[in-house]
Structure formats: structure tokens, C-alpha cells
Amino acid sequence: MSERTPLAVGQIRLRPDERGHDRWRIDPVGSMTVPGIVYSSDALISQVREDQALRQVANVAMLPGIVEASVAMPDVHWGYGFPIGGVAATDVEDGGVVSPGGVGFDISCGVRLLVSGLGAEELGPRLVRLMDVLDRKIPRGLGAGGVWHLRDEHQLLSVLAEGALAALGAGLASEADLAHCEDGGVLQDADPSQVSERALARGFGQVGSLGSGNHFLEVQVVEEIYDPGIAKAFGLSRSQVCVMIHCGSRGLGHQICSDHVRTMLASMPRYGIVVPDAQLACAPVRSEEGRSYLRAMAAAANYGRANRQALSSAVRDAFREALGTAELSLLYDVSHNLAKLEEHDVEGGRRLLCVHRKGATRALPPGHSDLPDDLRPHGQPVLVPGSMGTASYVLVGVEPGGAFSSACHGAGRRLSRHAALRQVRGRELRRELEASGVAVRARSDRGLAEEAPLAYKDVDEVVATCERAGLARRVARLRPLGVVKG
């Protein structure tokens, strides 16, 4: 059977979309008010078909106020409520809702890329020393412990209100860092009063830490340049050493999601909202519950940005101690678990939408007013980490783009953690990675096995699909030299 043959799963019928070879369509059935659109190549679609994500794409298409389509990126896989790799926008002024499941538990989980002035040949024999220092300086794991030791709850509230700007005040950031953060490093509508005491307690001791799971800090080298002009504008060149950081809002974000899902489940009958899955609990954007969630979510996003900024300061300290230089500039910092109020052209008119991106990153085109002055002529850097031991990518947003100016956020899982553990032994994987030239610093062989490369899709194919679909364009490919695992 050809990979382009329509597939029926229950009532869901996935068929090739006439608008592009890398687009698949789920026509509306039942309570779906818009279609589902899945960006996927022929090579990737079989993995999507084996996942529960298609059912979730269809479920999201039933949300009140959703416009255009429920969208899935090429790295899509099953998640909580929304699929990971899901994008959906609701009309704020026409009953549109916000759903915590469309953001996820790790609010503002995101990626930043630090660019060094070193070449791979200069790092060479000093890599082991650098990895040892990073291993010692970078807190990670499930519990408390961060490089930024907050004085008291008042300072935590400042982090929630000010994000990376609070890190600037603490000497952990520069003005240049903030300029190259999404939103300048701070969401202005954050309201710490909407964050529960339980969430505050979980977040107090974790600012400047990786956490666990798929979070990581990776030392990389620019292996290939696809667009020399954009690469030069981004400060990237072949053989250049970079550091990629992937983490989010830790226990604080998780608790905020849990708190507001419960609140919305209780409030939905009052608004006459019925959803096909309790994990899609939601409330109108303009309602008290919707506004409360968005303000708490923004506070968690600020925490996530401060978290990555504090880790950047620790990385610079490690470079100074191990290599005698702290020259690391921030290319960009972008979240891939967030809901934002944005204006987009929909059905011929400009409308205010609540755009949910869960496991998807903004991919703003050249000229967009939200970009810093030096990046605006070129478009937004889109940072796409691969699986451990495989390549990562820097892409750039394009005009006109698609999916409300969104792109993929990574390779995307194809195996659950339990399935990966059945196929991989962490100790053996560690040896294989070290033998391939990737220095590994991980506290747990089990955690290493859960994140094995075979548990993820082919990031090269995911990124190529994004490019062919007109979501973003490749700029550079980065190869790992060393990884510190959460």
C-alpha cells in the first residue's frame, strides 16, 4: 500500500491534502468544526499512524472557537490532551478558549543557543575538562537545587513577574542576552498572585537547573551551513563551538498546569463547554478562569526564561574555569510550550487569536516587529534539538510561513520511555556514545536509556519536512560533542 493512501482509524480518515505533498488532512467528522492538518513526509507518516496523536488532533478540532485547523508538526506524538507538536488558535472575541493541555505541564519549556568564539580544533583535548566542570556546575534531577540561590519568596515573585530581567538585576544576564530572548525575556502580563502556594514552594529552590527527562545541556559544533548569508547574520560559522540548553519551568510550571486544569474542569458546565477528553479542560479566554490561567502561565514562562538565563551564567563560568574564556553570546531563546495572544489574518480579516503551541516553536518571518533589530531583517532563529547523539538544527522563519508562524520543536518521540527501556541498556548506550565521540555526563543509566536516539524520529527528516512545507528554512546543522543530561 502506498504511504499516500488514505487511512481510516475509527471515524478518523487521514488523507493526502491537495495543498502539498507533505500535508495530510483529517476532514471534520462528529463535533470537529475545523479539519486536522498534519505536516508529515511519507517517511514519517507511518510513525504518526501508529501513535494516538491523530485522535488528539481530531479532539483539538472540537474546541470552542478554534479557527482554520488543528495542526500537527512533523515531530508530532501523543501527549496530554493536545498532541506534542500541536498548534491550535482560537478566536478570542468569538468564544475562543484557552486550554492548559494546549501548553502542557512544562510551561515555557524551550531552547536557547549560546555561540562561542572557539573553533572545534581549539576545544579539542580540553573537551573532557570542560565536560567535567559542566557536570559539577549544572544542577539536574527531580529535586531541588539550582545555581541561583534565591533569598526569599519575595525574590521568587520578582522572577515570576520579571523573568530574565530579574536575572539581569542579579548579575546573571546582560542587556544583549535580553535582546535576543523571545519577548525580551519577560512576559509583561504575568501575575504571580495567580500562582498557588504549592507551586511557589515547588519552584523556590530550582531556578537554574535542568530537571530530568529529555532536558539537556549540549556542547555542539557547527557541522554544516545551508544558508551562508543568514548564518553570517546569526554569527554562525563552520567548526564553531556552541552550547544548547533545553529546559523549562520545572515543578512550578507543572503545578500551575495541574491547578488550572482542575479549576477549568469545574467551571466548564457554567459556560456550556463539553470536550471529548477531560485533558482538554478549557475556559473562554475572556473569562475569569481563562485570564487567571494566562497570567499564571506567563509567570511560569518568566520562571522558565530566568531558569535558562541562570544556567547560561553557569555555562559561562564553566567555560572560564575550564578554557579561560567566557565569550558566549546568545543567538536566541524561544519557548515551545506556550499560549499567546497574537493577531493573524484569518478568512480575510485580522483577528486576535489565542495561539496554543505545545511542542512547537514560533517561527516569525523577516520584518516581524517582535524580533530584535539585528535579527528582524532575516527572520527568527528557530532552534530544533535532535535526540541525544544526533544532530540539532538552526532554522529561520520564512514569509508567509504557516500554522500561525510555527514550526517543529525537535525530533519527536517515536517510542515511549518504557518501550525504550525494553530495547536499550543505559551503560551500553553510554559506551556507544563515548565511542562515537560524544562525551556523556549523566547521573542515571536508566535516564540515559529512556532518551536513547532510537526512541526519537529522524531529526534530519523532520527538519527537511518543515522546510519543504514552507514552515521554516534550514540555516545550520550542529553535531554534539558532549551532553549533560537531566
Image (tube, rainbow, N blue to C red):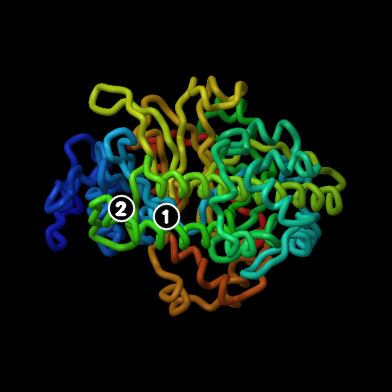
Residue identifier under label 1: 458
Q: Secondary structure at mark 2?
A: helix
Name the residue: 48% across, 23% down.
368
The answer, for residue 425, to whether it is visible in the render is yes
Task: Name which of mark 1 and mark 2 comes first in the sequence.
Answer: 2
Residue 428 is situated, as x and y percent measured from the top left of the image, at: 58, 76
Residue 101 is situated, as x and y percent measured from the top left of the image, at: 39, 55
Q: Secondary structure at mark 1?
A: loop
The three-letter amino acid code for the residue at tag 1 is: Asp
- Where residue 419 is drawn, which disc sits there? none
Left or right, residue 44 beside residue 121: left
Residue 417 is situated, as x and y percent measured from the top left of the image, at: 45, 71
The three-letter amino acid code for the residue at tag 2 is: Ala
Position of the C terminus, as image quadrant, is bottom right
In the foreground, 405 or 282 = 282
The answer, for residue 75, to whether it is visible in the render is no
Name the residue: 15% across, 56% down.
12
Q: Say if mark 1 contacts mark 2, CB within 8 Å.
A: yes
In the foreground, 405 or 156 = 156
Above or below, 210 relative to 74? below
Above or below, 375 relative to 275? above
In the foreground, 213 or 337 = 337
Name the residue: 46% across, 62% down.
258
Position of the N terminus, as image quadrant, is bottom left
- Where residue 43 is drawn, which disc sits there? 2
